[in-house]
Amino acid sequence: MRIKNFNQCALAFCAGLFAVLGFAPFSIFPFAVFALAALFVQWQRAENARAAARLGFCFGLGLFCAGVGWIYIALHDYGNMPLALALPATGLFVALLALFPALAGYAQARLDAPGWARLALVIPAVWALLEWLRGLFFTGFPWLAMGYSQAASSPLAGYAPLLGVYGVSLTAAAIAGLLAMMWLRIGRLGLVLIALSLLWFGGEALRLVGWTRAQDESFKVSLLQGNIPQEMKFREERLANTLETYRRMAQQSDARLIVLPETALPLLRHQVPENYAAILRDHARRNGGDLIIGAFESGEGRYYNSVITLGTAESQSYRKNHLVPFGEFIPLRPVLGWLINEVLNIPMSDLARGGLPQVPLAVAGQKVAVNICYEDVFGEEIIRALPEATLLVNVSNDAWYGNSHAAMQHNQISQMRALETGRMMLRATNTGVTSVIGRDGRVLAMLPQHEEGVLTAQVQGYAGSTPYVRFGNAPVLGLIALMLGAGFRSREKKPG
């Protein structure tokens, strides 16, 4: 019996590993669906709810070990956490995330619906619901939600403007459930194939819908990638070289909008030399446009991770509102403050939230919704600036994660935001991925990672609203509730 349990857990763990291949940088999107189908088959065969939870936990361990194990690099290589602490901390983080698939396995088993209803309705709904909850718990960490694996080549990406990333997750899970039904020979094969076809080709048809419309003429943008080593970024002796790098790169561009990465200038706004700011401002004005620059701001004894603007438009700023726990603020400071103050060496670990609402930045003839680094993981927050905003801009610094696949995963998340909103997304990053993403979620241009460069492209502002912009996550949550309700009612018809 123990050997059987071990084999089952090993298979679930391997399925989780396999699922990672569906995400960037691999982006073999069917793999994520097949991995879910393998897990759902195991759940259907599980002896009880505890066994199903165990399988879900093992799947989660495989998924998050391979998918977000790069958190170790930030803790150890750049946060200076000792190896003896960094490894357990990374393992604990992965284990906490794995509890969500474990809870999904337990919940679907406890509902005890008939086989067809469990696979077609209950399991997909529970899976999507737990992903949504993971995006809320402890300020949220929706990284590796299954919907992201479908951005942007999969036909299922067509559901993003309707239902957002969790709607794409729900659809992917529903297809996985149908594949599991075929494997287990549950239900009528013909009906299962029809359902699969409708979901798959329905998504492809939705990709043809133009939810938003072009506004005004296209214009030129330049996205700067300074490639400043993370270990040098906040050192005083490197400051002059950093400022010179971005001055030189900015002055090489004749673009109407020039975007610098997150905290490109590792200074407080009032510490930026006036002659330096004047040089950048005058250059932007000669181009007939503006610069967006990552820097810090202070006010009333608080410090903010911000972007500021210089150029033809009145100077404006946006302050990051959704902060990263431990990276930018210390939760439960009286208990956990020692972790940052005595163990980690993270220079932005005591920042304040920018607050809401913050209006889009009026620059270069556009209304730009800026999001800083981790903020673009939360689609329901990005749409707050819409439909007023015509363009999305993300400024990031993923140098914290070295040569891992974190930066490519982050870029894929931005692709989903473009799909959901029907807006182009411009990404300016320190070491990559710096890219221009079309409103259909496809990457139009990209710089090589870990190289200095300027990415220049013609871009377009868009107006109008997708259904997701109008209604957010409400429709997918309603659909989840309907599916769970139908699954619950099916128990009355369950034989025996």
Image (cartoon, rainbow, N blue to C red):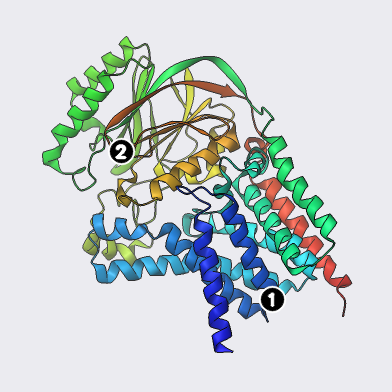
Amino acid type, residue under disc 2 in the picture? Asn
Give the camera-side residue of 339 and 496: 496
Residue 302 x, y percent position in the rendering: 31, 44
Q: Residue at x 51, y 21 (%)?
A: 460
Residue that mark 2 sits on: 430
Disc 1 crowd, CA 10 A, few/some/many (<14, 14-19, 20+): few
119 left or right of 83?
right
Residue 383 x, y percent position in the rendering: 56, 37
- Quadrant the C terminus occupies: bottom right
In what element is the residue under mark 2? loop
Residue that mark 1 sits on: 45
400 left or right of 367?
left
In this rendering, the answer to whether 253 lies above or below 125 is: above
Splitting the image into 4 quarters, where does residue 88 fall?
Answer: bottom left
Splitting the image into 4 quarters, where does residue 67 fall?
Answer: bottom left
In this rendering, the answer to whether 33 lies above or below 493 is: above
In this rendering, the answer to whether 484 lies above or below 218 is: below
Give the camera-side residue of 139 and 47: 47
**Which residue is at the far left?**
237
